[in-house]
Image: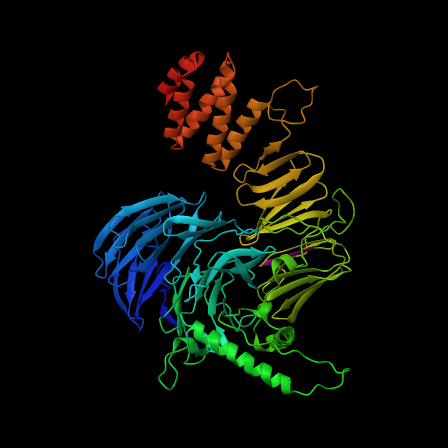
Amino acid sequence: MKVCKIKTTEKSKKIKSIFSLDLFDKDLVSSSIAGDITLYNSMGEVLKTFKKHSCSALCVRFFPDGQNICVSYDDGVVVVYNREGDTLYSHKSHSGDVSGLAFTDNYLVSVGYDGFVVFYQIDGSKIVKKIKSHNEKITGVVYSRRNKLMVTQGSDGVVLYSGMDVVKRIPPSEGIILENFFSRMDWSVDGKLLACGLMFNNKANSVEIFDKDLMPKYSLIGHVAPVEVVAFNPNIYFQEKPYHIVALASQDLSISMWNTLKPFPFLLLKNVADMPILDMKWNEQGNVLYFCSYDGLINKLEFEEGELGDVSRRNEPNEEGELFLTEDNIKLHTIKKSKDLDKKLMTIKMGKKSKKIETIDKPGVDEIEDFVSKLPENVQQEANKNQKNINKKAATENKTPIPQELPPADKRKRKRVAPILLDDKNTFGTEKMFIFNYNKKSYSINNTEPFVKHYGDYKIELNKERTVVDIERNNIHFFSVAGEIKVLCCSRKYLCVFAGHLRIYDVRTGNLLFPFIGTCGVCFIDIYRNNILFLETDGKLTIIDVKKEKTSNTTLPASGEVLSVSFSKEYYVVVRFKDSQYFLDKASGLWYLKKNNWNTIHTQDTNFNNTIDETINKLENDFLVYKQTKRYDRMREVVKKFVRKISRINSVQEAVENKLRRMLVDLNSLGQSRFVNKILQKLNKKFNLQYFISDLLKTL
């Protein structure tokens, strides 16, 4: 096996991310973030490059006959080109990103972030039908010519189609994916198995293997980040029994290859790209795997003949020129062998009764038996022994094997390693240990258990006594941090330890980034990208920008029991108290109230001693909060609630009118004029607001 580069980006030029690629015969086509469509020959030489659209080209696919090319863009446009780059057909099919394309036997299909599936005539000349089968964005589509079924995957789950009809839906698995561009699913060549990434099994990243009825069969677990791209090899291989090979490309920058006879990958390639892999295809012979990545590269893995195995006997004639066996032939042949075996067993003399008699399983029949869950127990034990041997050799070979596949979810009891509180107190103090990761909640585990975290090749472990943090790289000790550790927080880049002083280390080098930082005591730490925050016991909050080596300080906006302080992608920094939440505005440095126990018409446990209705105040505050974070959809929802509220009032005060006026003017200035007009039309039905509407129209 060898890795070869097809396309490299020049250092003097800006990187052009490659979003998609496809193969036909010996030709390859790619699409880039700049909208470039490039054709290559089998030697990697550029045949032609053209750009006929100014937007990013998200997906490119050859037509089944290889004569034309279909490209989808991030402005909702789908275009059909010939090989010379001439535009044949163009459709504005979606309202946003068009993430995937596929060809069925009768239609060209596109899917997009707007949740629509669009069917075109097979030549792409005309839109035939448009259906909305998802409520959220669709990230991928795939079709099997063998079983005539199509599958789409989106944020709200997976949908199975027969023709244009929805056959089955399965909800999304439980887990958090911070970001993904696409979902490149794939069917096996016989149409019996579907590999689907961006899934979770017991909250662990996995690729789920389904049968053609979308019934879950197996989980491929081991990658530390989500898997966006999967690709089945177009061959069925044979080693005592037939098996498939599937390649997985993960956001952890690695590619793993699995076959359906083993519970762990037979090949793991780390750091094959500098940025995530976005598309991947096998050639027709199944000996070359092409993949493109966000760093603007197209690479290929070349395998020598026989390196992946022997092509299945079912696909080839035998040496005497006879036709290969059909499944019915194999059944009859297996039954005959079983009868012959029974006759032989009858002739075996029985030993003493005290001896243990082992049973002999009869040979299987027509279906491919996949993965270790169907292997005999002795084979499973042997597989486990082999996996342990691999782990022992991994340190010297600089390879970290992916853990073997877990048993089915209903029988699995995975031990969770999570952020922890190390004491039994109910309020925070310097004796607690808090560990936060972006977009993940804080958890607690028993203080007799060690804390363990894995980041690719790195392992961070805190001992039971909370006195030493060990960092391993490739299963070899890298460095340690010792002391009476009270607070610990780690990420892929940084390790923060509070043991009397706050220490910040670079995980990848083991270097101390700043001198020991003196504090009056630390109770919370959080890390997001290159920013670190820590809260001291006197309420002082410090935020460090590690790259710029700058710090900013503030104090908490309220007193009381602090539940957490953490970074937020949307709100910068959020502090949660028992009855309220605040967020820190980065520009002004002010804390704004995000949530509170308002006394509104929707409050269930209303304090009957409080006769003040705070509904208007809450809605006005929510509107300004969403305006700060540019959440226009939530701003519109607030205005709708505000209008429903004042519609029940016979006489609206001028101060309330001014609040609504400001909301509508702000939305209009933010490009939401159509929504504002709809609201005014609704309010115009109320007589006592007509003067207000007339005056507002003059302002707008």
Is 495 part of what is drawn in magenta? yes
Q: Position of residue 84 (x, y in %)?
A: 21, 61
- Please name whichever residue, 254 or 353, is drawn nearer the observer in this view of the structure: 353
Q: Residue at x 67, y 59 (%)?
A: 413
Query: Which quarter of the picture shows residue 512?
Result: bottom right
Magenta span: predominant SS is: strand
Q: Does residue 682 appear left or right of residue 598 in this picture?
A: left
Residue 71 placed where, x, y %?
31, 55
What's the magenta region?
493-497
The answer to whether residue 56 is visible is no
Quadrant of the frame with the N terminus: bottom left
The image shows residue 195, relative to residue 400, as above or below, that is: above
What count of labels does the image hold?
0
User: What x and y, as percent, mark residue 124?
Assistant: 26, 52
| Quadrant where the image shows the C terminus | top left
- Where residue 458 sits: x, y (%)? 61, 65
Residue 538 forms part of the magenta stretch: no
Is residue 156 at least partly visible in the picture?
A: yes
Quadrant for residue 277, please give it.
bottom left
Instruction: Tell me the residue at 48%/71% (across/down).
Output: 366
